[in-house]
Every structure is written in structure tokens, then in C-alpha cells.
Image (cartoon, rainbow, N blue to C red):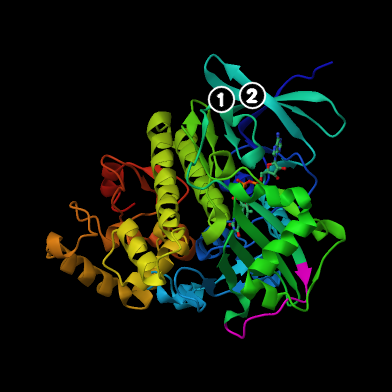
Amino acid sequence: MQEIAEDFDVVVIGGGPGGSTASTLLAMQNRRVLLLERDKFPRYQIGESLLPATVHGICKMLGLSEELKKAGFVRKLGGTFRWGTNSEPWTFNFSTASTISALNAYAYQVERQKFDTLLLRNAARKGVDVREQHSVNCLLFDGDRVGGVEFVDTEGNTRQAQARFVIDASGHQSHVYKHVGERIYSNFFQNLALFGYYEGGDRFPPPRDGNIFSAAFKEGWFWYIPLSATLTSVGAVVSKQYADQLKAGHEEAMNHFIASCPEISRLLANARRVTEGVYGQLRVRRDWSYTNERFWKPGMVLVGDAACFIDPVFSSGVHLATYSALLAARSINSILTDDMDETRCFNEFEKRYRREFRNFYEFLTAFYDMHQNEDSYFWKARKILKTQASIQEAFVTLVAGGSSMRDEDLLVETGKIEQIKGELQQLENVDEDTAPYLSTEKEAFLDVLVEEATQIQTQASVGGKRGMEKPLFENGLIPSADGFRWREVESATAAGGA
Ligand SMILES: Cc1cc2nc3c(=O)[nH]c(=O)nc-3n(C[C@H](O)[C@H](O)[C@H](O)COP(=O)(O)OP(=O)(O)OC[C@H]3O[C@@H](n4cnc5c(N)ncnc54)[C@H](O)[C@@H]3O)c2cc1C
């Protein structure tokens, strides 16, 4: 017998970083949130290299900074590449970007089963009704509007939960995203990944020992991520045209790819592949870069991999998942608390999310052209961010997830806000002919790197004390002072600040 449906403000499908973040930010605003997760945590997941925007922005907002520090994850100061025409490895450090304070110029390499569990347990502590081993079957509708979910509980009973909003954060395996729109796969990134874990792999000398290392070879590229002093995550990303290599067996294919890449062969010379436990198998992922044609419909939003996914060269997955979760939670809080218009809020969510995705997508398209040297990649980053910053700084800002984060307070602390304002002033005087990478609207350095107010870092650091922001889009919304909701520009002005 089917029970009477339970009732919530929001039901979140999936307890990965996207689902945990969205549900926590809603519960922190006193919303009644149910999170349904199919698996029992800790559970395995790929995606171990994080960006500073996640660690110092979102995680701080979630109240997780101290726990993260204590967890003992490897510190990542940047990335090292053997890529392009340069046969020597080259390194970028997050500290290069002036928008990232020296104190926050690092991220972590995480075992996802541990990291995701921290986030999920935190959601429960913050008041989210977290139910593991609960799998969502399908959506409930009220006309065209999504009004809840049907799910199977731990005992195998089919049950229903009604909600004002449903957030699909069930990742690339989502089967409900289709109600929002079709998934459009990229023609450009038609790759697959084969990955496993190794004990005893070599390390670069400090301070690069915690960096992600990405090495290009004939069939594709490798990631090499130090997860502890001895454990390394190693993955080969190859074009789909080399999929036949896998027919000989995963072990054989992996050994073949490693042998084809001198840098990875050298690093793994004295290592052994882990063959037991959660890291004991070689895994394959084939579904590659895609984006849904829409990110929301009445009563429902898609966050994280349920909405879009991009090739992992720059470790953007968890950043995009948690950033989109923040935007979604902000929108739903605004609709439920301030009675703001759903279309207006979700359009803002979608535009900001697409913009961040596009920044990475465009840059990666250029990065995959391995005939260039690193200066070209840096220049491309500058073009995408439309900045006048040094080319290295633009590159680092993009790959740190920094185009979505605001670090104004820390900039003020270090006196850099004046520097940025000066650069903006200079930009006003720039001759377009001599600055081919600047847009005619002169949306520039400050506009992209500072005035895009996801305010995740600022909120985390200064709370309601931060200043007014400009909308990112014409007639767009701005974040509230605490970062949990949207504001109309006029109402923020009348109130004397956002
Ligand atoms: C080869 C590869 C390498 C990558 N490397 C990186 C990297 O270095 N850094 C990085 O940041 N990202 C990386 N990523 C991307 C990263 O894995 C994802 O972007 C990230 O995990 C997305 O988080 P999410 O919360 O959207 O989804 P997920 O982490 O996939 O979480 C979704 C959750 O939903 C649950 N679920 C699914 N269906 C249901 C259902 N019906 N009912 C209830 N629950 C359900 C699942 O059990 C899961 O726990 C990589 C991806 C790939 C493929």
C-alpha cells in the first residue's frame, strides 16, 4: 500500500557535491529539505582535484573550513603540465592571480568518498533530512509543473514526496533531466577516460609535490593526482578513436598508454597498481562533454553534472557543481522567502551557470590544440575573461574557478583593489585596435573578475558588510549581502547596500 506523500519545500535528488551544497544552503535559510541519495556513503566517485573557489568559497560558506583543514587532504598549489610544443613541464600557481589572496592560493586533492561524505554529513547537521539508499524513480507533476518525486526507500517501498521545488543533482547518470530538455553532446570533446590507482608513485620536488600533473601523449593526455604521500590517481584521457585499445583488456590498455607517455612511465617506474578495495579496479568513463538545452523548468532545476559536464583537464567539475548549487539555492530561497518571480530568478541562475561553463569550454577548446605553447593558452584565457590582467594571471584566475568568485575584502586587505581600479581606468582609455582581445562593451577586468558577485569568498569572509554590486547582465539580479538570495538593484540601493 502506498503511503501518503510527505511534504517539503525542496527535494534534492543526489548527495554528491552539487546536492549537498544546494540542500545545506537551503536548510541554512530554514527551508524544509529532503535529500535522497541512491548509494550508502562513503561511496566511490571520480573527480579528485579541487579548485580554490570550492575550498575557500563554497566550503567556507557551508561552515566546513576547519573540518577540511583537519581532514589531511593533500594541498594543491597549482598545476604542472607537459603540453603543447614545449617539451619541458611548466607550472602555474594559484598565487599568480591577484584576485586570489596569498592565504587562499591553494586547493586540495581529495579522495572523493571522504570529501563527499564530509559535505553530506554537514548537510544533515545543518537540518537537511538526508536519506541514503533511497533512489528516485520519477518525478511527480502538477500540470506542467514539477511537484515532487517518487522514490524507493531502504525497505523497497515505493513512496512519494511533494515539494515546491525539485533539484536534480543526480549527476551524469540522471534519468530525470530529460523533463527539462535534451542533453547536447559536444562534437569537439569526444573522449573517454581509463583510470586507476597506484601506490608508490614518484613525486615532484616541493612545492610542486601536491600539484596535479597533466601530460600529453600521442593518443591523449594523462592526469596524475597525488592523493596522499603514497597513493596516486592516474587516468588516461584518449580520443574515442582509440577505444579499440580497450578491447584487449583494461590492464593491457592502461599499460600501453603508460608506456606511450615517458613522463608518466618515469613517475610510475617503482609503483604498483592497487588491485584491492575501492581503488582496486580500472574504471572507464565514456559519456563526455555535454550541456542540457535548458537548466530549469517550472518547479525544477538541474545542477552539477545533471546539467552539464566538461572534459576534466582543469578540474572544473566539482567547482561547477557547487557553484551551480549556490546559484540554485539562492534562487529558491529568493522565491520562497521574498516572493520573487521564479522565471526571473531561474533565468539569472541559468545565465550565470552557462557563462561559467562557457568560459571553461572555450578555453579548453584552445588548450586541446597541442601545437601551441603555453603563452598561447594564457592569451586565450585573457580573451575569454576579457581582462587586461597579465596573461599568466588571467590563465590562473580562470583555472582556479576565479571568474566566479569575488575576493574584494581580501583585495582591500592587500591594497589590490586600488590596483584593479587603476587597471579598469586604463582600460577605459584603451585603443580597441591595439587591444584585440577586449570586447567593445569594455566589460573588463573588474567586471569579470570582481563584479561577478557569486560572493562566495566575500560572503564567507565578511558576511553582510560587503558593498554594492552591479548585475552581470542587463536588468539582471545581484546577490544579497549574505549571499543566500537575489536582490533587485533598486531595492538594494534603497536599503543602502546589497
Ligand atoms: C574522468 C573524469 C575525471 C574527473 N576529474 C575531475 C577533477 O579532477 N576535479 C573535478 O572537480 N571534477 C572532476 N570530474 C568531474 C566530477 O566527477 C563531477 O563533475 C562531479 O562529481 C559532479 O558532482 P555532482 O554533485 O553533480 O554529481 P555526482 O558527484 O555524480 O553525485 C550525484 C549523486 O547522485 C546519486 N544518484 C544518482 N541517481 C540517483 C537517483 N535516481 N536517486 C538518488 N540518488 C541518485 C549518485 O549516487 C551520486 O551520489 C571528473 C570527471 C570524470 C568523468
Left or right relative to 479: residue 277? right
Q: At 56% from the left edge and 56% from the top edge, which residue is drawn?
A: 312
Q: Position of residue 326 (x, y in %)?
A: 51, 48
The kind of secondary structure the magenta stretch mainly shows is loop
What is the quadrant of the N terminus in the image?
top right
The amino acid type of the residue labelled 1 equals His
The tag earlier along the polypeptide, 2 or 1, is: 2
For disc 2, the marked residue is 139
Task: Based on the picture, tell me whether residue 199 belongs to the magenta stretch.
Answer: yes
Quadrant hosting residue 149: top right
Residue 350's label in the rendered image is none
Q: Which residue is situated farthest in the bottom direction here?
A: 205
Q: CA distance from mark 2 to mark 1?
A: 9 Å
Q: Nearer the viewer, residue 290 or 136?
A: 290
Q: Is residue 278 above or below residue 417?
A: above
The amino acid type of the residue labelled 2 equals Leu
Q: Is residue 145 above or below residue 136?
A: above
Q: Is residue 38 above or below residue 434?
A: above
For disc 1, the marked residue is 179
Q: Nearer the viewer, residue 445 or 325?
A: 445
Q: Are marks 2 and 1 in contact (CB under 8 Å)?
A: yes
Give the residues drawn in magenta, as a range. 198-207
Residue 17 visible in the snapshot: no
Task: Based on the picture, tell me whether residue 120 belongs to the magenta stretch.
Answer: no
